[in-house]
Image (cartoon, rainbow, N blue to C red):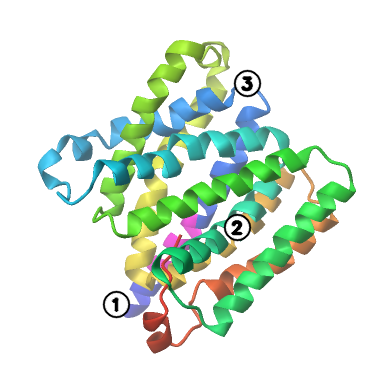
Amino acid sequence: MRARSLVIGVLAALAVALIASGWQIVSRHGVTTSLGPVELAVLRYGVPALLLAPLWCRRGSWPTALSKGRLVLLVLCGGLPFGLVVLAGARWAPAAHMGIFMAGCMPLFVVLGGWMVQRETLGRVRVLGLLLMVLGVVALGLGGWRDGLAAWRGDLLFVLAAVLWAIYTLAFRSSGLSPWQGAALVNLGSTVVLLPVIVVWGAPRLISAPWADLVLQTLGQGVMAGVLGLVVYAIAIARLGAARAALSAALVPVFTALGAAWLLGEMPDRSAWAALALVVPGVVLASGAFVPKRRADKNRIGAT
């Protein structure tokens, strides 16, 4: 039974990485073809809000200690603004940059935030992992700047998105919400915030875009990233533990780079490969999966 549980956990972690990288590739494809960030945001948050409606309709099940301020923070940093920043960045920078910057910056900002707010400590292994991630991100940024590429605009937006997600992560830790409840609230709140945007600017490409693109983005944005990603990540955590489940993040930039090269024709340059070589082992070390259990419990920083 234990071997079966391990296999299920590994498969779930692999599915998490595939879904995350698939969302990045699908997003890059959407904003560079027939849809814009607003149209993709409608599919990314509106579809999950409808699918998770039974959860946000059950008001009596929400933690009473959840303040309105924290709820607003969760929606603003983990919902619509985060998604729009990522989608806007995808218009400027290739998918491989998205995978590397998101995987390399999110854990770093979470750790910095935990240190500033909760005075959390780190062991040497995790510090080494964070250092490798910083070096990888810097290598990719300098490579794009040296080559005079316009991708730096998207790279900066990915860094901003990582800051927003780090704030969301820290706010979610002490919210008392389950992952399902958090997803339901964030998607509903984002949809409500998105309504005035649609009223003012509209989302005309949802009408003019080819049906094939709409189906692809509905499945990729709303169903896969918005709902199934949450389910399989919860399974991975239950079967492997939080630290080892977080190792799936190390596969995301690799899958994104390879998938973008295959599906979008975006071949990573030398700086991207160098960044991958630094960020991937950095994520592995910073996850805490190889820290002794006693020390990991004492210096826990949480998973992004």
Whole-number angstrom distance, CA of label 2 to CA of label 3:
29 Å
Q: Which sits earlier in the primary sequence, circle 1 or circle 3?
A: 1
- Give the residue displayed 42% in from the left and 64% down from the top: 117
Residue ID for mark 2:
105
Badge 3 amino acid: Ser
Look at the picture and state if 149 lies above or below 201: below
Badge 1 amino acid: Met
Q: Which residues make up the magenta segment?
A: 8-16
Q: Position of residue 12 (x, y in %)?
A: 42, 60
Residue ID for mark 3:
34
Q: Which sits earlier in the primary sequence, circle 1 or circle 2?
A: 1
Tally the marks: 3
Q: Position of residue 90 (x, y in %)?
A: 65, 37
Q: Which mark is residue 1?
A: 1
- Give the residue displayed 51% in from the left and 71% down from the top: 287
Q: Nearer the viewer, residue 76 or 36?
A: 76
The label nearer to you, 1 versus 2, is 2
Whole-number angstrom distance, CA of label 1 to CA of label 2:
37 Å
